[in-house]
Image: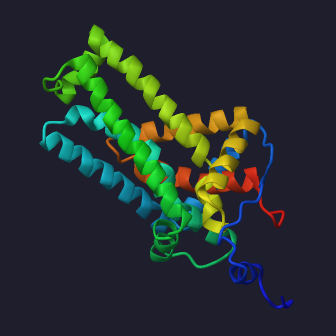
Amino acid sequence: MTAAETRPEAEAKQGASPFVAPAYAVREVPFDAPYSWLAVGWRDMWRVPRVSLAYGAIFAVAGFLLAVGLRQVGLQSLILVLAAGFILVGPMIAAGLYETSRRLEKSEPVSLASTLRAGFFGGGQLAYMGLLLMLIYLAWVEIALLLFMLFLGPGPAPPLEAFVPYLLLTRPGLGLLIVGTAVGVALAATVFAVSAVAVPLMMIERVDVVTAALTSVRACRENPKAMTLWAALIAGAMLFGFVTLFFGLVITFPLIGHATWHAFRDLVERGDGS
């Protein structure tokens, strides 16, 4: 092997896997670190507002159109299921925002097209993570439909305007609310643990899904207070977006996306010490 050969070229000649699986070091961060992530995420958002708010608008419009579609076919009670499911696939949808913050950090040019290509069409292991999150989302929808049948019976669900009172004031509704919330929280916590820093890591390192997910779980395990606060802030931001009929997501979605990049930079120490 000559000195001029790069490591990837040498591995390719030896028939090695194109992905490496190093053990990334995880840093400990203070409990209030998520507030600083939000602060720098807010700064990033307003450095390139057209790009950032475009992502927020795309996410908000997609949610609004899905909600309208469910209402048109008489499944408006599933809008709450849809809202919860958005949190499950959000880490992957925000990939373009991670790329935006990375480019800002490196003083590279930023455009919507370039970040879309790097984020949504990155291919490789990112595609596997996207598939994993989508499968979890579909599982959540199936579980929700099963719970509806168990607690509400095979008939049509109450209309949306009567659904919330039904959940709070009837025994079957309370049962559905308690069990559904428990299942949703468990799935959301699982997705958060395996994806909190996994997607940004896979975007900049040649690393497989399992290694990225295990690194993310270690980051959560070694910083339980900070990551619990971070999960609560994400949930609160998304809830605000939904209760404002998706309009709030134009701001909250890109804010969380940019902040997630800085959470990754604080939590994971890469091979070059950065």
In the displayed image of the protein, which residue is found farthest to the front? 15
Q: Position of residue 154 (x, y in %)?
A: 16, 23
Residue at figure coordinates x 79%, y 88% from the top left? 5
Q: Nearer the viewer, residue 143 or 195?
A: 143
Looking at the rendered image, the quarter that the N terminus falls into is bottom right
**Is residue 75 toward the left or the right of residue 214 in the image?**
left
Residue at figure coordinates x 66%, y 63% from the top left? 207
Q: Position of residue 272 (x, y in %)?
A: 82, 67
**Is residue 166 toward the left or the right of residue 266 in the image?**
left
Q: Is residue 248 above or below residue 254?
A: above
Q: Nearer the viewer, residue 14 or 69?
A: 14
Q: Is residue 42 above or below residue 236?
A: below
Residue 86 in view here: no
Q: Quadrant of residue 61?
A: bottom left
Q: Nearer the viewer, residue 135 or 167?
A: 135
Residue at figure coordinates x 82%, y 91% from the top left? 4
Q: Is residue 61 above or below residue 146?
A: below
Q: Nearer the viewer, residue 184 or 59?
A: 184
> How many numbered discs?
0
Q: How is the image coloured?
A: rainbow
Q: Quadrant of residue 67?
A: top left
Q: Position of residue 194 (x, y in %)?
A: 59, 45
Residue at figure coordinates x 26%, y 48% from the top left? 66
Q: Is residue 220 above or below residue 205?
A: above
Q: Position of residue 82 (x, y in %)?
A: 33, 40
Residue 78 in view here: yes
Looking at the rendered image, the quarter that the C terminus falls into is bottom right
**Is residue 122 toward the left or the right of residue 40 in the image?**
left
